[in-house]
Amino acid sequence: MTTLPQIVSGLAQGIPFTVVATVGGIAITIVLSFVAGFLLLSPWRGVRFATRIYVEGFRGTSEIVQLFWIYFVLPILVGYQLVPLVAGIVVLGLNHGAYGAEIVRGAIRSVPRAQYEGAVALSLTPAQRMRRVLFPQALVEMLPPLNNLFIQLLKSSAILALITVPEVTRQAREVLIPNFGDATFTIFGLVFLIYLVLAGLITLVMRLLERWAARRLGRRPLRERRVLEPV
Amino acid sequence: MPLWDWNYAWSILPDLLLALVTTIEITIIGSVIALVLGLVFAVLRRARIPVLDQILWAFIEVVRSTPLLVQVFFLAFAVLPALGLQWSAFVIGVVALGVHYATYTSEVYRAGIEAVPVGQWEAATALSLPSTRVWIGVVLPQAVPRVLPALGNYVISMFKEAPLLLAIGVVEVVNAAREAGSQTFRYVEPYTLAGVLFLLLSYPASLLVRRLERNR
């Protein structure tokens, strides 16, 4: 067990990369989910179609293909190489944003039609309708599936190891396993623990958001069971 | 040098298609493991056997909340050496993928089983059917069709996550693309073709699942 401090510090060096990749990826995911989600509801067919191509393109291909494409192919096409961590964050965001767009679209569509009609009857403008009536109700619906999506993203951040980002998984694989071959269970036990804690933190923040969003509507938070369908 | 060379693209296509067969094999065998093991997990958890239930719960939570890549490495570098076993990369990959997704499918089955009306259980008990017949004859025929679309989505997810196994040297599509690219230093065609192959298979599959969802 004399190796434990070295193992811990090796993994600890990876944590900032995992956290930055996840937080950065989530930030891009949130922006893209809302932008693409709203565009999917656009009255213009052309806009919906173009957004569909983004959504289906990223949902239909493997995340690893996207990662390698942006990291190895894009530099050839545009002559500019992204730093591995940035390339990784961009792919995590683009990929999960495509899934998030469906969540946002679905949540807005699931608001009862009478709510929309009521807002029209009160002669609210389209912007007011969305901001005051539809969106606050949709937000409550979309937070639990977004929680799953963000945890999915955290787990996906491990593939950044394949493009040399020294995050937790790569630290374990490239630095610790070759050096501490007799302590593999300790190494992996700690790696699992790190991801569990990070996933727990994401869930904690999302539950607080759910409570806040529900309270705004004067409801109790609806806590749906985790994962039924892949988001 | 042109950005896209059709001759080169054609020349590497056979290798990529061959590797695609491996990816499909991984998906099919992995799916069988995930679908069967997930059902076993769901039925066992329903039985609520003390200790075993807690172990299963912890196992499912840990596997679901941690990256597949870490689990692949864990199996390859910790579990198998400890057991004194040597598996090929393909087997390690398939088992890791199958077990990982079994934790997801078990949740899907559980939701399906819980959606079977209580009256069905009560009627089966009233007829004093043995528990195997309750499951096989009454509960599962009602629970499984309901969750088929969700299971189908996971099969598609497995297909798209199979390239992860290149990390332990399985030659699936993305690895074959990398090989082709490293020989010629041309990466545009291999990786683009790899992406197109994924899209060609998974998009129609996802349309199929969506149709299944609607017709339910």
Image (cartoon, helix red, strand yellow):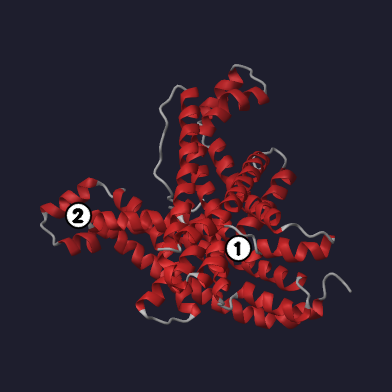
Of residue A192 and residue A114, the one placed in the foreground of this image is A192
Coordinates of residue B101 in the picture (x, y in percent): 43, 62
Residue lying at 55% horizontally and 41% vertically, measured from the top left: A106
Q: Residue furthest front?
A: A2
Q: Amino acid at mark 2?
A: Pro
Query: Tag on residue A161?
Result: 1
Query: Tag on residue B50?
Result: 2
| Number of callouts | 2
Of residue A12 and residue B186, the one placed in the foreground of this image is A12
Q: Is residue B34 above or below residue B14?
A: above
Which of label 1 and label 2 is nearer to you? 1
Neighbourhood count class around disc 2 (C-alpha, 10 Å): few under 14, some 14–19, many 20 upward: few
Of residue A191 and residue A224, the one placed in the foreground of this image is A191
The residues bearing labels 1 and 2 have C-alpha atoms spaced at a distance of: 39 Å
Q: Is residue B185 above or below residue A47?
A: below
State which chain disc 2 sits on. B
Coordinates of residue A14 in the picture (x, y in percent): 57, 56
In terms of image quadrants, where is residue B132?
A: bottom left
Coordinates of residue B15 in the picture (x, y in percent): 66, 82
Neighbourhood count class around disc 1 (C-alpha, 10 Å): few under 14, some 14–19, many 20 upward: many
Pointer 1 with pointer 2, Cβ within 8 A: no
